[in-house]
Structure formats: structure tokens, C-alpha cells
Image (cartoon, rainbow, N blue to C red):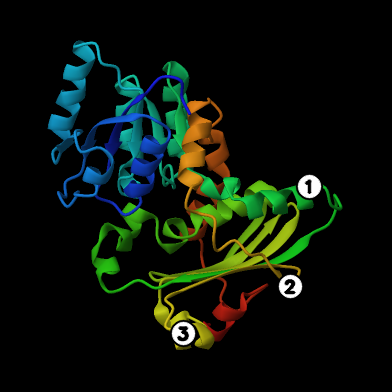
Amino acid sequence: MSEKSKNFGLIGVAGYIAVRHLEAIRNTGNTLLASLDPFDSVGIIDKYFPDSDFFVEFERFDRHFEKLKRSGTNIDYISICSPNFLHDSHIRFALRQGADAICEKPIVLNPWNIDALQEMENESNNSIYTILQLRLHPSIVRLREKILNGKKDKKYDIDLSYITSRGNWYKFSWKGDIQKSGGVATNIGIHFFDMLGWIFGDTLQNNVHLLEEDKAAGFLELENARVRWFLSIDQNDLPADIKQKRQRTYRSITIEGEEIEFSGGFTDLHTETYKNILAGKGFGLKDARNSVQTVYEIRNSKTLGKKGEIHPFANKLL
């Protein structure tokens, strides 16, 4: 909890993840001055900050904050929940406002965007933070401690499977445009790649076997792990038992054949992230770099087909 209430702006308040940020701003005892979204289906604000201002046009949002600054009201943080391809621009806006940026992942789409933002951050008096909430998940923290305290030269065999069904709307939204979202591996996979790199070290090898608009699969060799991974938004890829239960999501990570359970415990991770940021201990550009590099390489790779270490789900499709 911060000692004095901080002033926030929020970009992308109509997005599905924005509610986690609204909760985190409120739970840490801070104030939302204004939010922005071109879509006006934002009644959720009433639950958290009914007196805050709302804009559908960026120009008016910009002008509003300029007016607040001139009247002596500082903007301390701007939270960014906009589409992936706009993150870079909105982070720059935050720094120009004299605010710290708190950006959803992926913080940017390309590694060189990180370099440019690093320069801008160095020249400013402000900081750029990102949301890497799996690093705060109790099960993941315990796993990392176990690995760090284990054999130093051991390579762990890992299977990562994540299928989260999406309807036809997906391909018509910005998420279905690889230039705007970065594709499936970026959109639904980047937090897993960040988590694996955080625990098992830097990427040594990055092979892609399958790369389509609704699914991707490959093999990652990390310093301390060999990872077969499969990501999909196609409900047809769900295991039969999951379909029978009429569930639309399947998430599994096995290490040496042992399932890692972390399906619960996500509810408060954004609030914990905000607490760390407010204490000056948030995750920044350097923390985000490895996963941004990984997904950039994936979407720009030539597929290998049935060569090498292939995830079992991908093997059925190749």
C-alpha cells in the first residue's frame, strides 16, 4: 500500500484485462483520474472509479492530462491495456506526460522496440514496468526455488500445452492480425515463455514445427530445460476428455512427467504486481526482453515439420 494516493490514467479500459488493473489501482489505495478507449462499453468503471473521467478520443485524453498538469495535478502512472501493437506508442505517451508506464504483456512486439524505449527511459525521470504476473504465482515461485536449489547441470524435460478456444470473432479482431498482435505465440504464449526463461535460463535453441494463424508448436532448448510446446485457440485441438466436460480451455505443464498445478491463484496477481511497482520493485524492460525475443523468433521462423523434438499434439497435425 502506498503511503500517499497516486494518480493514474488508464488506456484500453474496455479491454477484458483492464478490470484487473482497475482492481489493482483501487486495492492499492490509489485514484484513477481518467481512462481512454475508442469503445464506450465501459460501465465496469462504475464499480471502481465512478467519478473518474472517460474519453473515446486520444486527443482529448491527451489534452485533459495536459490541463491537469498545468493546474498542478501530477499523473504518477499510466496503465496500458491497449492492443499489442499500440503498447510502444502508449508507453512513450506516458513518459512524455512525466508518468511511469505500467504495460500489459507483450510490452512490445519486437526486440528493437525495447532498445528504443530503454533509451527514452534513460533520458527521462520515469520508469517503464510490465506485467509478468506468473513470476508472482506461489506455485511458480516454489518451482523456481526448487530448480535453483537442485542440480546445477541438470536439463529438465518439459511439455507445455495451452489450448484456449476462441470463436470466429477472434480472426476479425486485431488479435487475428499478426502485424497487430504478434500471432498466437505472442498473444497467448508470451507469459509462459517468460516464466520458463525466468526459471530455466536463456534460450539456446528455438525451433518451430507448426505455425498457423490459430496454433503454433515448437521446441525450445533453455540453459536448464528442453521444452516441447503447443499453443492453440482451436477448440478441435482440445483433448477428448476436456471436450466431454464441455470445457473450452486446457492448460498443462509437465516437468519430467510430473504435472505442475497452477490453474488457480491468479486473482490477485495484478494487485501484487502493482504493490511491487509502487514500492519501486516492478519488472521492467530488461525482464521482458527474453520472452519478446523468443516470440519474435517464433513468428519469423521457417517451420521444420516433422524434424526434431515435436510436441505430441503437433505430431498428430503434421
Above or below, 240 against 152 in this view is below
Task: Place residue 159 in its image quadrant.
Answer: bottom right
Secondary element at tag 2: loop
Which residue is the site of mark 3? 245
- Residue 15 locus on image (x, y percent): 28, 51
- Residue 58 locus on image (x, y percent): 17, 35
In this view of the protein, can residue 98 be seen by the observer? Answer: yes
Which residue is at the front of the view, 183 or 36? 36
Mark 3 vs mark 1, foreground winner is 3
Which residue is at the front of the view, 152 or 150? 150
- Residue 205 locus on image (x, y percent): 66, 57
In primary-sequence order, the first of circles 1 and 2 is 1
Task: Place residue 248 in its image quadrant.
Answer: bottom left
- Residue 86 locus on image (x, y percent): 30, 43
The amino acid type of the residue labelled 3 equals Lys
Residue at coordinates 29% horizontally, 17% vertically from top-left? 74
Above or below, 316 against 53 in this view is below
Mark 2 vs mark 3, foreground winner is 3
Asked whether disc 1 touches disc 2, contact meaning CB atoms under 8 Å apart, the reply is no
In this view of the protein, can residue 211 be seen by the observer? Answer: no
Residue at coordinates 48% horizontally, 72% vertically from top-left? 163
* 10 Å crowding of disc 1: few (<14), some (14-19), many (20+): few
Residue 148 has which mark? 1
Residue at coordinates 13% horizontally, 38% vertically from top-left? 57
The amino acid type of the residue labelled 2 equals Gly
Residue 257 has which mark? 2
**Residue 241 placement, left or right of 310:** left
**Residue 165 placement, left or right of 161:** left
Which residue is at the front of the view, 186 or 49? 49
